């Protein structure tokens, strides 16, 4: 009887600890996502993740000049007509279009909108495979760690400002969020 009681008490303590640890990780995840959102909604990222069909430009995130949008792609003018794989300064053209491998907007049927979302809505969207390009949370880490268009944000060319924290800190925040099962603030 005594043994049983001790056993039950131990189980209670261990499961309480596990719950506490789970809560700690989820609390950390919620905090970390606030930082993640600050990057996603900074101009270098948000300008390609607009709520409408046109990409945005500059720190003021104004609609792209030359009437560029998903419609212009459909009309036969891909982004790569002007955007090369490198920033134009890197090939000797000041003030020209920035560049990166695969320069494009997310597709119309999976627009991955970062603009105008609350932090909570953005969090829910980012972990929803039906809205994030069918990605697992592990693939989101992979994407933010290595995708050239994400890396471009920290090497944007011209006088463009950088996202509000280093790429390392950003990746760390995404990993903390994923470690807490993508809990949302
Ligand atoms: C030139 C346009 C462009 C820029 C700039 C850009 N992205 Fe994207 N992004 C895309 C496209 C296109 C996709 C969809 C392709 C894919 O799923 O691989 C995408 C997909 C994503 C995804 C996965 C889908 C999702 O919503 O979960 C994340 C996360 C992401 N981008 C984050 C960023 C971050 C962070 C930055 C800034 C540091 C950034 N992007 C800058 C075009 C861009
Ligand atoms: C006719 C040429 C042309 C086409 C086509 C074009 N762009 Fe641009 N784009 C430019 C130029 C020039 C700039 C530089 C002006 C600036 O600094 O905002 C630019 C800037 C941008 C920026 C601003 C980057 C930033 O963070 O400030 C984004 C985002 C962008 N383009 C996305 C796109 C996307 C996505 C497409 C395809 C749907 C596209 N562009 C098609 C010429 C073009």
Image (cartoon, grey):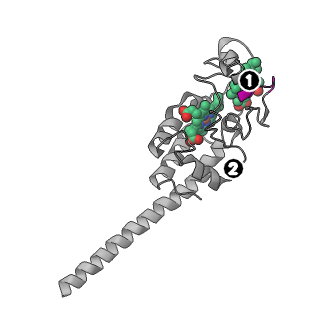
Q: Is residue 9 left or right of residue 152?
A: left
From the viewer's side, name the closer residue of 113 and 86.
113
Q: Residue at x 73, y 27 (%)?
A: 71
Q: Name the spot of residue 136 as percent of width and height, x first.
A: 46, 44
Looking at this view, name the residue that lies furthest to the top.
92
Q: Is residue 175 left or right of residue 63?
A: left
For ligand 1, give the image quadrant.
top right
Disc 1 crowd rating (10 Å Cα; few below 14, some 14-19, many 20+) is some
- The label on residue 84 is none
Between circles 1 and 2, the one closer to the viewer is: 1
In the picture, the quarter occupied by the C terminus is bottom right
Q: Is mark 1 within 8 Å of ligand 2?
A: yes
Instruction: State which quadrant residue 163 falls in.
Output: top right
- The label on residue 72 is 1
Instruction: State which quadrant residue 149 falls in.
Output: top right
Disc 2 crowd rating (10 Å Cα; few below 14, some 14-19, many 20+) is some
From the viewer's side, name the closer residue of 10 and 114.
114
Give the answer, above or below, for where 59 lies relative to 80.
below
Magenta residues (range): 65-73
Measure the alpha-carbon separation of dots 1 and 2: 25 Å
In the picture, the quarter occupied by the N terminus is bottom left
Q: Residue at x 47, y 65 (%)?
A: 23
Q: Residue at x 52, y 42 (%)?
A: 171
Looking at this view, name the residue that lies furthest to the bottom.
1
Secondary structure of the residue carrying numbered label 2: loop
Q: Which residue is mark 2?
A: 117
């Amino acid at each position: 009887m005594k043994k049983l009681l001790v056993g039950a008490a131990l189980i209670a303590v261990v499961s309480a600890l596990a719950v506490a640890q789970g809560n700690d990780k989820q609390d950390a995840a919620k905090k970390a996502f606030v930082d993640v959102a600050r990057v996603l909604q900074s101009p270098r990222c948000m300008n390609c993740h607009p709520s409408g069909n046109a990409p945005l430009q500059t720190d003021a995130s104004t609609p792209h000049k030359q009437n560029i949008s998903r419609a212009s792609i459909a009309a036969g003018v891909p982004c790569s007509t002007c955007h090369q794989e490198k920033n134009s300064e890197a090939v000797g053209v000041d003030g020209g279009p920035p560049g990166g491998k695969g320069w494009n907007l997310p597709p119309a049927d999976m627009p991955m909108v970062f603009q105008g979302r609350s932090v909570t809505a953005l969090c829910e969207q980012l972990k929803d495979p039906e809205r994030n390009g069918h990605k697992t949370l592990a693939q989101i880490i992979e994407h933010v760690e290595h995708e050239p268009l994400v890396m471009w944000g920290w090497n944007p060319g011209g006088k463009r400002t950088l996202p509000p924290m280093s790429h390392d800190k950003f990746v760390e925040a995404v990993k903390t969020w994923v470690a807490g099962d993508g809990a949302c603030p």
